[in-house]
């Protein structure tokens, strides 16, 4: 199989690049080693769309973050039917002596083009963020920040890219990369051989290994583990903004995070590890996160927590690595995409397209590019009157499968039709199984619907791909 471009990795960077390249008359192949897109680094993202502060004006990530924020707010959220909430962010201080640091962050943000930055005092905070604790003295307000579902962002990008001709192949772990006599790339993935003129490496935690496999061992990925804790939906109005402490040299600190789905989160920690599979949570991590969050909002209780999880950020120095590797003509590395990578992804995609163009890839626009994607129905985001109308048209919207998160049978069926082939795929698309019972009541119903839609036995249904089957066939 021959393509103009092969993209390795269907996280948010790879998905955004695929969607951007789908504008042009190109054959693009998107390879993902997991069973579905967004199952790698992107699945553990907090969903923050950063304003662009807290990044040096000299940094690539700073400029790409601000541009990615603009693209999402002004174009992508509407085009792709995404639920984006522009709630704004606050960087708080506990000592008025740190006002000079906030002034510095404000100045650097303005150099990057961040709009509307404002220093606010305790009186402003009392009016707009009444649950803040007494230790908080002042803050920097950035109104362009917001929140989004990171999974549904990736799925929307991939769905739209496929709608525009990109070929997606999952469960395709890359085993080898070779160069042909013609200078093309030959990628062996999942037992299949694919060829292309250009190779874009967006492999997240494994980008260093893919780059080395392609012949450019020029950087190392160090996993940086972040533990985060999801709170009960009953605490939805805990905070009105994204709350950041004054950042340290290595981390943005422990945050209080609004989410687009309602449940607040607290975290993350930021500790380097050598294990790219370490997704464990710890007592020490919980204590660190609770201490940091409760200093800003003392009313947060351990009893509010309904889920623990950890993610690994692919750190590779202080800045993103986005470049053509001259030692391997045709290879573009997109690596070290940690925070604010989710925000920057749309701008990263445009940058990668420009790099490819500069290396000889012809970008001829299609006569018809389908930029719009209908917004999927999520009952937990729909007013009751609209829900009644949906049920009148289709009674399956009134058949509630997940009571914790108000997810209907029709939403589950729609998720499967849009590409969910695993229980986690349904969960990330719909929130079914995300409540306090963790799927205790809804999993069997979801599996039955998946069996009906996909046409394979219930024993073949997995949580997140082969090896995670829930039901064993004792006859085998």
Image (spheres, grey):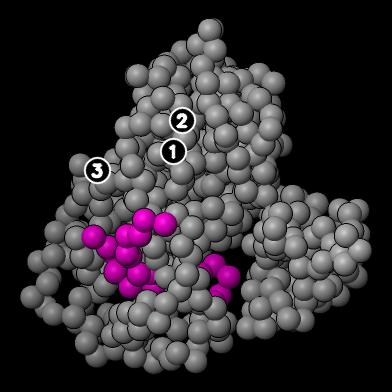
Total numbered circles: 3
Q: Does the magenta stretch include residue 272?
A: yes
Circles 1 and 2: CB atoms closer than 8 Å: yes
Q: Where is residue 3 in the image (x, y as percent from the top left)?
A: 63, 21
Provide the residue span drawn in magenta: 250-275
Q: Which marked residue is nearer to the observer: mark 2 or mark 3?
A: 2
- Which of pointers 3 and 1 lies earlier in the amino acid sequence? 3
Looking at the rendered image, the quarter that the N terminus falls into is top right
Question: Considering only vertical position in the picture, is 266 above or below 107?
Answer: below
Q: Which element carries disc 1, helix, strand or loop? A: helix
- Which of pointers 2 and 3 lies earlier in the amino acid sequence? 3
Q: Does the magenta stretch include residue 201?
A: no
Circles 2 and 3: CB atoms closer than 8 Å: no
| Relative side of 445 to 121, left or right | right
Using a 10 Å C-alpha cutoff, classify the residue at mark 3 as few (fewer than 14 neighbours), some (14 to 19) or many (20 or more): some
| Relative side of 195 to 96, left or right | right
Give the residue drawn at x 88%, y 60%: 476
Give the residue drawn at x 80%, y 52%: 417
Using a 10 Å C-alpha cutoff, classify the residue at mark 1 as few (fewer than 14 neighbours), some (14 to 19) or many (20 or more): some
Q: Mark 3 points at which residue?
A: 59
Q: Mark 1 points at which residue?
A: 209
Give the residue drawn at x 57%, y 35%: 174
Q: Position of residue 152 (x, y in %)?
A: 61, 56
Instruction: Quadrant for residue 48, please give it.
Output: bottom left
Q: Name the residue under label 2.
A: 213
């Amino acid at each position: 199989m021959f393509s103009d471009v092969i993209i390795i990795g269907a996280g948010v960077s790879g998905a955004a690049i695929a969607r951007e390249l789908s504008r042009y008359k190109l054959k693009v192949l998107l390879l993902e080693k997991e069973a579905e897109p967004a199952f790698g680094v992107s699945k553990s993202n907090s969903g923050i769309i950063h304003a662009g502060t807290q990044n040096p004006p000299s940094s690539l990530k700073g400029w790409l973050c601000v541009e990615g924020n603009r693209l999402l707010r002004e174009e992508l959220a509407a085009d792709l039917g995404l639920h984006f909430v522009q709630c704004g962010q606050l960087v708080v201080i506990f000592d008025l002596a740190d006002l000079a640091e906030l002034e510095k962050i404000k100045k650097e943000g303005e150099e990057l083009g961040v709009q509307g930055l404002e220093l606010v005092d305790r009186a402003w905070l009392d009016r707009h963020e009444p649950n803040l604790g007494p230790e908080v003295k002042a803050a920097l307000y950035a109104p362009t920040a917001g929140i989004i579902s990171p999974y549904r962002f990736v799925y929307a990008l991939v769905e739209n890219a496929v709608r525009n001709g990109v070929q997606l192949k999952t469960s395709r772990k890359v085993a080898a990369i070779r160069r042909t006599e013609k200078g093309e790339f030959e990628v062996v993935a999942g037992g299949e051989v694919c060829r292309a003129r250009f190779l874009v490496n967006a492999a997240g935690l494994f980008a260093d290994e893919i780059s080395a496999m392609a012949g450019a061992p020029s950087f190392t990925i160090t996993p940086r583990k972040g533990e985060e804790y999801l709170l009960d939906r009953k605490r939805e109005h805990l905070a009105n903004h994204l709350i950041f402490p004054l950042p340290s040299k290595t981390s943005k600190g422990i945050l209080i995070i609004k989410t687009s789905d309602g449940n607040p989160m607290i975290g993350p920690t930021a500790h380097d590890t050598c294990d790219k599979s370490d997704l464990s949570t710890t007592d020490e991590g919980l204590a660190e996160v609770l201490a940091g969050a409760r200093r800003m909002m003392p009313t947060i209780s351990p009893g509010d927590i309904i889920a623990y999880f950890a993610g690994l950020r692919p750190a590779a120095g202080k800045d993103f690595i986005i470049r053509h590797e001259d030692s391997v003509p045709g290879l573009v590395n997109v690596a070290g995409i940690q925070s604010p990578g989710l925000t920057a992804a749309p701008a990263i995609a445009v940058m990668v397209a420009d790099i490819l163009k500069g290396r000889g890839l012809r970008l001829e626009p299609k006569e018809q590019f389908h930029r719009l994607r209908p917004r999927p129905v999520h009952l937990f985001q729909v007013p009751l009157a609209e829900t009644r109308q949906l049920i009148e048209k289709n009674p399956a919207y009134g058949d509630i499968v997940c009571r914790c998160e108000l997810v209907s049978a029709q939403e589950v069926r729609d998720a499967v039709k849009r590409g969910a082939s695993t229980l986690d795929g349904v969960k990330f698309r719909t929130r079914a199984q995300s409540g306090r019972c963790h799927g205790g009541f809804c999993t069997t119903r979801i599996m039955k619907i998946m069996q009906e839609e996909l046409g394979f036995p219930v024993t073949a249904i997995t949580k997140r791909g082969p090896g995670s089957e829930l039901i064993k066939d004792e006859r085998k």
